[in-house]
Amino acid sequence: MHDRDSELRSVEAAVDQLCRGFAAGGTEIGDLLTFSGRPGIGKTSLLHEVRRLAKLRDGATVLFARGGERQFKDPYHVLRQLLQPVLSDLPPDVFAQVMGTWEEVVGPAMGLKQPKAGARRLDPQGVRDGLDYVLTQLAPRRAPMVMIVDDLHWADGESLSWLTKFAIRSSELPVLLVFAFREDESDWPTETQEFRRAVLGLKARRHELNRLNLSSVTDMIRAELGDKAEEAFCYEFWNVVNGNPFEVIALLDQVRDQELEPVEENSRQLRELAVDATGMTLKSWLDRLGASTLRYAWACAMLGTDIRVDLATRISTQSTEGARESIKQLRKQRVLTQTPNGNLEFVHPLIASSIYNTMPDATRLGMHGIAAAEIENAGLGLLAASRHLVETHSGEGDDRIVKKLRRAAIEHQLIGAPEAAQRCLHRALNEPPADEIKAEVMYELGCSALLTDPVATVNQLKLALDPDELPLRPELRVDATFRLSEVLAHAGELGEAALVCQREAEQTVDPAGRQRLQAASFMWHAFRKSEEDGPGRSARLGEMCRSLNGKEASARAVLAMRAWDLTLRGAPSAEALALADEVLDGGRLPKGLGWTDTTWGFELPSMLCLTYIYNDRIAQAERLAADAIIQFEVAGWSGAHRGFAYFLMGLARFRRGLLAEAEDFLRRAHRISERIGDMLPLAWDAVGVLVDTLLARGRIDEAWQLANDSGFHPPYHATAMVLPDAASLYGKLLVAKTRNAGAAAALTEAGSQLEIRGWRNTVWAPWAGHLAIAIAGDEPERAREYAQKAVHDARAFGTASAIGSALRLYARIEHGRQAVELLEEAVAYLGQSPAGYEHAVALVDLGAALRRVGRLDDAQECLYQGIELAQHCSAEGLVDRARQELANYGLRPNRVGLRDFRDTLETLSSSEWEVAKRAVQGVPPQRIADELGVPIGIVNRRLAAVYRKAGSGPDGLASALGLPPQQRDLGRLGDLND
């Protein structure tokens, strides 16, 4: 190669570094090389040399792909070239390990398998996440690995989206990435301009290829034309081609064909010859190739890269013999070359572009139609044919074309390519479809953008529902309305979402469809930040719930909404749990209400999960959240859906007191929210509970910084409520920062708004208890009123964690024996709940209160218990506070011999199982103590461990432990009644 010594040295060094690093046991040894330059400057030749050098290394895996000007709209075209060969070559057991749980996501996207029957559309982010996993498994097994992509500027958007992200992390794997591309903006398709900016921003060993110098061009001329080439001729030749290697070769071909002597007097003809060499017109190609051979070249240009001879033959409508002659001529004219697998490719992409661009419009449209048909006939499927279908002549109203494009759109969605699906459906609308199905195509177009482009979804669904269009079928109209409301709600337009459903319900005749839309309207109202008639809506939902009969999915959906409504209102927990349990089928979501079910969306099971979280049935909530995470991963839904599943699991772990695990899940949710959009409801939810988690861990300044950085302060989200109540969380944060005046104002406003809506759940929104603390110094009597209100509302709700937490907050504003009594009751209640952190705080508070009234032995025991439980909860700040209390009186900071506080059922000791089985049978703690012959205090501690490890309070304990519910001993019941 000429003038590429520095680039070749860089390549050799990078390959050598990779191979040596891997041989030495290294894994995080990846690198990125990029080569850029104008067309024809020699990027492809350089990458051929990279491939050659890498293949010389023992054990190296070399993967190669090339973007195509005609194929940049083919989803995953580049990634399939890269990964199909190596993945297909894996033994079945290794393939299963590499794919993990992502086979049904990555497999179809990479063309390794067909989507399963009944498969749902894939989220493109899910495909990217799956590819991340697959590469982290594949790279170490096939290391050292060199991944080469030529003509990256023509890579498809789906491949570019992953490659640009993977390139950032490539240093973490034994992978050398090598990209070649044109830098100029005009050389990148409009659709992939954002990726151009990403590529240019990558941290890499960059090489911009410069033009060849005069000496190199002179050497090339003399190698081709002989040493007789004169210096003046060579100089003018170099000037004309501007040192471009492709133009050097093209002009040399012209000089040789014209038998031009390389002497000074002929140098004036070079410029004219160069125009013919590089600026091929239809006439020049016809003159050079002839009509028949040019038609074959057109067929090849349509197919792009890795051209199958049989397909090009049929598209060009030539005989086998005619095609053979065309190929011979095209190879002779240095237009085509043959690859090792027998297929064809253009000698240079510039030649392919030139030939394609000479096609008359009518010829191009017609040949795309032939190409689509022949690709289908060859068994390559609609996905491959659709690229040509969208380029065919429209305006003929061909129902077959519309049908094929709609089917192709479905197949594109099943591999995570919604943009390709939308191109098919836009083209179907331009055909146009028959009047009676036009609205259906609009509906499908709207749904195709559901996971990726909310604005497009809203616009298309509104068009599909437009009364001026021929109407959708009734069932599709209901579904289109629900989809429209869903997208509006996810964008925070909850009021409009509810109104859309309400209006359509009034016009819907079918009872099931009407009920679905009415229920959806209730659901979106429930998620609003504020509403005009909260109590009235709740009453109407109650009436709707009472009118239900049957166990169909729509009825269960209404029950789930009512259970959540009752939870927010702070109605007796038993009522909400009874409805929630009625929704489930054997402890699992019923058919029609699954996490990936499209009839109701993921909001319905989310409501059910939240109901269990706030009603002390946390183990059940965790099972639902775990199912959500798995199902969203399997479905390839990695956007807001999986983010919210992480949030639910984080919230459940937080309520259970597993703070380190909660923080991990919540940070995952927050990262996803940052990736998909600024300050969507998910972001507020994740930040709010993450702030609460950091406060619980004693990291107050970090919580404050996170809130400030994330904008977590009034006025919060403009339309959507935050889970849990944002204003209460913010007030709690201000109290922790001792900004009591600000806290009082924020919490007073929060309480006012919540009272208007009739929402009095003190776990969801503990505004009253924290307001009492904020104003206790200045207004002790008013503070006491708020604290008592919180306790009253908590008792009305009835869960042990709600009552215990409210009592603990009340104790913060009392002193002496009154504080001790409140905290003793709080500890008793929290010991019957799964809320481990709240229990730990109450124990430490009680220990401190007991010390202040002189009960040092009791104080010491409570503080030790609190420290052990706080350590288990990862509540480091609480541990420090308890140890300080002990240190003030010269006591040990730790009890000798810590107990096992791991929160799993497997860690229940035999003594804990004994009290658990009796508790399930309804035996009260004192009688358990009498039967086992142990002090009541020990029984209470064992029961607290049982509730914490089971993730449930008394009501759900049997189910959590897998024991028969409430099989009470009649003799014991008689004793209890005495």
Image (spheres, rainbow, N blue to C red):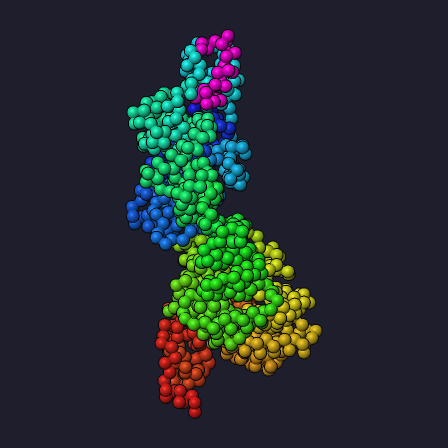
Viewer-side residue, 182 vs 142 = 182
Q: Where is residue 842 in the image (x, y as percent from the top left)?
A: 54, 74
Q: Is the magenta stretch mostly helix, strand or loop?
A: helix
Q: Is residue 43 above or below residue 662?
A: above
Residue range (magenta): 260-285
Viewer-side residue, 398 vs 377 = 398
Q: Is residue 280 magenta?
A: yes
Q: Position of residue 298 (x, y in %)?
A: 41, 28
Q: In this view, does 444 lie to the left or right of 707?
A: left
Q: Does the magenta stretch include residue 166?
A: no
Q: Name the quarter where the N terminus is drawn.
A: top left
Q: Is residue 822 above or below residue 20?
A: below
Figure quadrant of residue 764: bottom right
Note whether residue 859 is visible. no
Q: In this view, does 19 lie above or below 965?
A: above
Figure quadrant of residue 741: bottom right
Which residue shows up at 53% across the image and 41% down it? 194
